[in-house]
Image (cartoon, grey):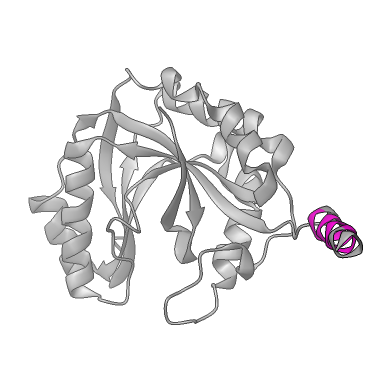
Amino acid sequence: MYKFIISMAIIFGMVSCAPQKDTTIAIDVLLIPSEEMYTQALQLNSKINANNPKTIKLDENHVPHITLLQGYIKETDLWKVTKALNSLYENIAQDSLKAESFFYDHKKEESFAMVRIEKSKPLLQLHEKTIKLVKPYLIKNGSGASFVQNPDNSPISNSTVHYVSNFIAKHGHENYDPHISLGVAQKKVLDSLAERVFKPIHFKASSLSVYHLGDHGTAQKLLWKSE
């Protein structure tokens, strides 16, 4: 019996000391808009989705959001990232954000649409602080496996993988373009939404969060939320 206990202790020690797989995940550090803007985004997306069911559908698993930073991190570093971000929401909680315009390509018969958010000084400062705090934990070896996988088992698009890899270089700092993504629809539908549905309102951020990204930059799985 004594030998058995010793053997089991050795085996347990070997298992517990074995290196754990350090998974790479794609994350989005983002702001969730307050209720009026959140509801408007859902309304716009619903009409876009009715015109094009294949485009993104915003819901509780694909939340309307304003990205501050996207990138790849080791899953074991998530707690370090969230600890670094812990008090950052206080920097924007009382500031007013503005839904500036309903943006799409007027020259195309079908176009991607989004609500463009005004690049206010507080929002730009928050973007820069987010990069500074998270950059020490960003890595470059992300792949399709780093994302929440598509329900139909189709591969994560290469454009999504590359977008996240190059976020800071191509979409950060002076190139930062805050917006809420809405999806792709025909121009005639977007023209109607711009005229009859979209409202350029002021709103606040209800929270700062970290989400596990899905295909096409969708915020799918909540990993952390500011208190």
202 w.r.t. 91: above or below: below
137 w.r.t. 193: above or below: above
Residue 23 sits inside the magenta stretch: no
Q: Quadrant of residue 84?
A: top right
Q: Quadrant of residue 116?
A: top left
- Quarter of the image with the C terminus in it: top left
148 w.r.t. 206: above or below: below
Q: Residue at x 21, y 54 (%)?
A: 42
Q: Can the viewer see residue 227? A: yes
- Quarter of the image with the N terminus in it: bottom right
Magenta stretch: give its range: 6-16
Image label count: 0
- Residue 207 lies left or right of residue 136; in this view the side is left
Residue 10 sits inside the magenta stretch: yes
- State the image coordinates of residue 94 (x, y, percent, origin top left): 32, 17
Instruction: Looking at the picture, tell me which residue is in the foreground, 151 or 36.
Output: 151
Q: Residue at x 19, y 74 (%)?
A: 51
Q: Can the viewer see residue 74? A: no
Residue reaching furthest left?
196
137 w.r.t. 159: above or below: above
- State the image coordinates of residue 201 (x, y, percent, origin top left): 18, 33
Q: Residue at x 21, y 40 (%)?
A: 37
Q: Main secondary structure of the magenta part?
A: helix
Q: Quadrant of residue 192?
A: bottom left
Residue reaching furthest front?
1
Instruction: Looking at the picture, tell me which residue is in the foreground, 66 or 150.
Output: 150
- Residue 87 lies left or right of residue 193; in this view the side is right
- State the image coordinates of residue 150 (x, y, percent, origin top left): 46, 74
- Residue 31 lies left or right of residue 199; in this view the side is right
- Residue 188 lies left or right of residue 223; in this view the side is left
- State the image coordinates of residue 109 (x, y, percent, origin top left): 28, 73
Instruction: Looking at the picture, tell me which residue is in the foreground, 58 or 121.
Output: 58
